[in-house]
Amino acid sequence: MLDHNNHLYRNMTWDGKLLFNRVYSKRSGNWRAEAVKEEKTFPHWTVLGATVLRNRIDADGTVVHPVTVSPSNLLNLAPNIAMREPPSTSCLVEKEMSRFTRKPRV
């Protein structure tokens, strides 16, 4: 929530032009174009990190324990969850932009 609120209104232009990236939606099963925003800054991490470290110093016991990841984990199987190849980014951007310029059906 803190990260979302801090980065909600970032600019979407880079050197005066819009850049887009392909994103796959699990819910709709479609690819879409999403505008690339400027890099995030994290000024709130200093306070947050200090608070976490202070709480860890004051806590009893240990939090260090090994975590194993199964080779069949979905993150190790495919670079994306789509079951088909993505269309080109330019096609997605054209489709996204033309969605609002279509003439209404009569």
Image: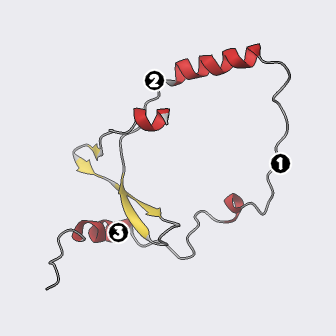
Task: Please say if the residues under marks 3 and 2 sit with CB atoms less than 8 Å apart.
Answer: no
Amino acid at pointer 3: Leu
Residue furthest toward the bottom?
106
What residue is drawn where x is 61% and y is 16%? Answer: 50
* 1 or 3: tag closer to the N-terminus: 1
The residue that mark 1 highlights is: 68
Instruction: Please say if 103 is above or below 81.
Output: below
Snapshot colouring: secondary structure
CA separation in Å, label 2 and label 1:
33 Å
The image quadrant that residue 102 belongs to is bottom left
Task: Please say if the residues under marks 2 and 1 sit with CB atoms less than 8 Å apart.
Answer: no
Say left or right for 1 vs 96.
Answer: right
* Neighbourhood count class around disc 2 (C-alpha, 10 Å): few under 14, some 14–19, many 20 upward: few
- Which element type, helix, strand or loop, lies under badge 2? loop
Instruction: Please say if 13 is above or below 56.
Output: below
Q: Position of residue 41 (x, y in %)?
A: 43, 30
* 2 or 1: tag closer to the N-terminus: 2
The residue that mark 2 highlights is: 43
Q: Where is residue 98 in the image (x, y as percent from the top left)?
A: 22, 71
Residue 92: assigned label: 3
Amino acid at pointer 1: Thr
Amino acid at pointer 2: Pro
Number of marks in the image?
3
* 3 or 2: tag closer to the N-terminus: 2
Judge by depth and name the residue closer to the eye, 26 or 19.
Answer: 26
Instruction: Please say if 24 is above or below 61.
Output: below
The image quadrant that residue 55 belongs to is top right
Say left or right for 95 vs 3.
Answer: left
Residue furthest toward the front?
106
What residue is drawn where x is 75% and y is 13%? Answer: 58
Say left or right for 5 vs 78.
Answer: left
* Neighbourhood count class around disc 1 (C-alpha, 10 Å): few under 14, some 14–19, many 20 upward: few
